[in-house]
Image (cartoon, grey):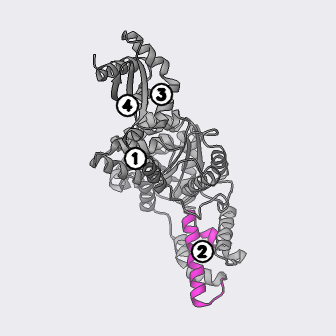
Amino acid sequence: MSGMNLWDEVLAKVEAKVNRHSFATWFRPTTFHALHGSSLLVQVPNPQFKDWLARNYQGIIAESLHDLGRAEVQVVFECEAAAAAAPDAGSDREAVAVSTALNPKYTFESFVVGSSNQFAHAAARAVAEIPSKSYNPLFLYGGVGLGKTHLMHAIGHYIQARNRHLNLVYISSDRFINEMINAIRFDRLPAFRQKYRAVDVLLVDDIQFIAGKDRTQEEFFHIFNALHDAQKQIVISSDCPPRQIPTLEERLHSRFEWGLIADIQAPDIETKVAILRKKAEAERVEIPENVALFIASKVRTNIRELEGSLIRLIAYASLTGRDIDLTLAQEILRDLLHTEDKPITIEMIQKFVADQFGVKITELKAKNNSKTVAEPRQIAMYLIKNLTAASLPEIGKAFGGKHHSTVIHSVRKIDTLRKRDPEFDRRINSFVQAFR
């Protein structure tokens, strides 16, 4: 029996002895290298693989060799990078470093803590202080512009400042997808896998965008398993809880729930005022109390818009030489007043829900009863019923001519889900607050 055939036989035996995801993560990437006497040389992607296999699977491999009547053979793992050329290790570290670009403004010190984000902030601090020992993975979720990315960057800064030896990667899911596509296109998948399996801390922003992309989910699944098995820290963010990400594979749903899930809600008015004061302090500008209250009471959507309104006011005052006061704020931010006076309409809610769930308004109105469309449609009907004066027949008509009994069913279903699922209730509450 040749060495290659022997390793294939060993793998067949091992596959029957370990669980499926462990085999796919740790054994499938291995390749036969050589057979020298009683030493079977097997290549693995990196030192992490070598150490993990030797520490955790040496007994199973020896048992498999014994079953094959080759108990005298010793398996020796060697790293592909070491076998190829020493400089490659440096280039790998450089490739990892490129992905760690963190915004210097996003730190724990610049993050304003309030009742809406206190839990998520505490969890992020715990993970930053003791990576992989507190919550792994940490899953942060919340609406657009509420501070998820800020917390992820803050974790990165904190870890890098205290553990410079750790390989840390922050990446958006869009960039991860693009890197994987290029790896497939240029036949560099092994290098792509090795890069991500060699990191110590992985921060992935907006994970919801990998939903529906089967190949990306497959690769991320194996990377997640490899890092989690090696006790490396994983932090993930999304605009909704794992179970509410449409078309995300069940195996990823369950793994995202292994650690801690923390939500960030829309800030209350006191927190918004504190955020404005912190931003003004960073810009070295004094902002009167009544101006801060005015902006905080008018901006209801997210923190980015809140800070954007302040920057707009500061810029105008600086360019015109005028003092920042309530009159100037009302003049410059009059579009906020206009929004305030605008009545909530069926169309506004339909667009809001479509944007939140990544579906088209036409899909909400169509006869599509798949879960990815049906649930957003029911939520939209529920919000319209509670936030507008529209009658049940009017609501049904706005959704492609649905019968009013369908509207009643949708409203009751969302009410039931709110009572049964605290996470779902918090999310619906954040939707309601966005319009108030």
Q: Which mark is residue 310?
A: 2
- Left or right for 304, reference 40: right
Q: Given contact means CB atoms under 8 Å apart, are the residues at marks 2 and 1 in contact?
A: no
304 falls in the magenta region: yes
Q: Residue at x 36, y 54 (%)?
A: 397
Residue lying farthest to the bottom in this orientation: 321
Category of crowding for the residue at label 1, using alpha-carbon neighbours closer than 10 angstroms: few (below 14), some (14–19), many (at least 20):
many
Q: Secondary structure at mark 1?
A: helix
Quarter that holds the N terminus: top left
SS at circle 2: helix
Q: Which residue is mark 4?
A: 30
Mark sitting earlier along the chain (4/3): 4
Q: Which badge, 4 or 2, is on the more N-terminal residue?
A: 4
Closer to us: mark 2 or mark 3? 3
Indicate the quadrant where residue 324 lies: bottom right
Q: How far is mark 2 from mark 1, CA to CA?
A: 34 Å
Residue designated by label 3: 53
Measured in 3D between alpha carbons, the distance from the residue under mark 4 to the one under mark 3, in whole angstroms, is 10 Å
